[in-house]
Image: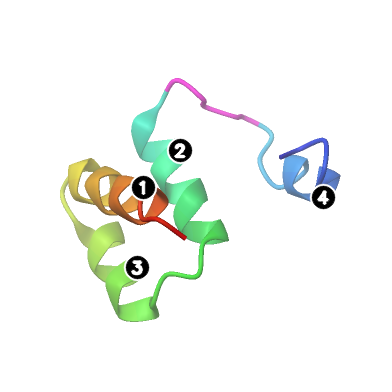
Amino acid sequence: MFTKHPELDNLHEDKQYHNLSWLCQRWLELLPVPASEKQALIQAPNCQNTYDYLMSIMQKPH
């Protein structure tokens, strides 16, 4: 993705690819998730709900 969109590469100096919470937050920034859902996911005590949500929308047939 960074090769195709280098402007995204500049948004975060400290890329934490090993951190699931960080990765989920980055996907929420990019995907067209309704604001109310995004806010609820961000406020959750951990990233499990966000991970489950992201996996469900990425696995839906297009």
Q: CA distance from mark 1 to mark 3?
A: 18 Å
Q: Residue furthest front?
A: 61
Task: Give the foreground label among 1 and 3.
Answer: 1
For label 3, count other residues whose C-alpha is less than 10 Å away and answer few (under 14), some (14-19) or many (20+).
some
| Residue type at numbered disc 1 | Gln
Query: Residue 38 shows which numbered tag?
Result: 3
Q: Are marks 4 and 3 in contact (CB under 8 Å)?
A: no
Instruction: Give the residue at x 18% y 55%.
Output: 44
For label 1, count other residues whose C-alpha is less than 10 Å away and answer few (under 14), some (14-19) or many (20+).
few
**Helix, strand or loop for disc 3:** helix
Q: CA distance from mark 4 to mark 3?
A: 23 Å
Q: In the rendered image, which residue does mark 4 sit on?
A: 7
Q: Which residues are magenta?
A: 14-18
Q: Is residue 53 left or right of residue 8?
A: left
Q: In the rendered image, which residue does mark 1 sit on?
A: 59
| Residue type at numbered disc 3 | Lys
| Residue type at numbered disc 2 | Leu
* Quarter of the image that includes the N terminus: top right
State which tag comes first along the sequence, 4 or 1.
Answer: 4
State which tag comes first along the sequence, 4 or 3.
Answer: 4
Q: Is residue 22 left or right of residue 5?
A: left
**Helix, strand or loop for disc 1:** loop
Q: Position of residue 57 (x, y in %)?
A: 35, 56
Instruction: Give the residue at x 80% y 47%.
Output: 5
Q: In the rendered image, which residue does mark 2 sit on?
A: 23
Task: Give the foreground label among 2 and 1.
Answer: 1
Instruction: Give the residue at x 82% y 50%.
Output: 7
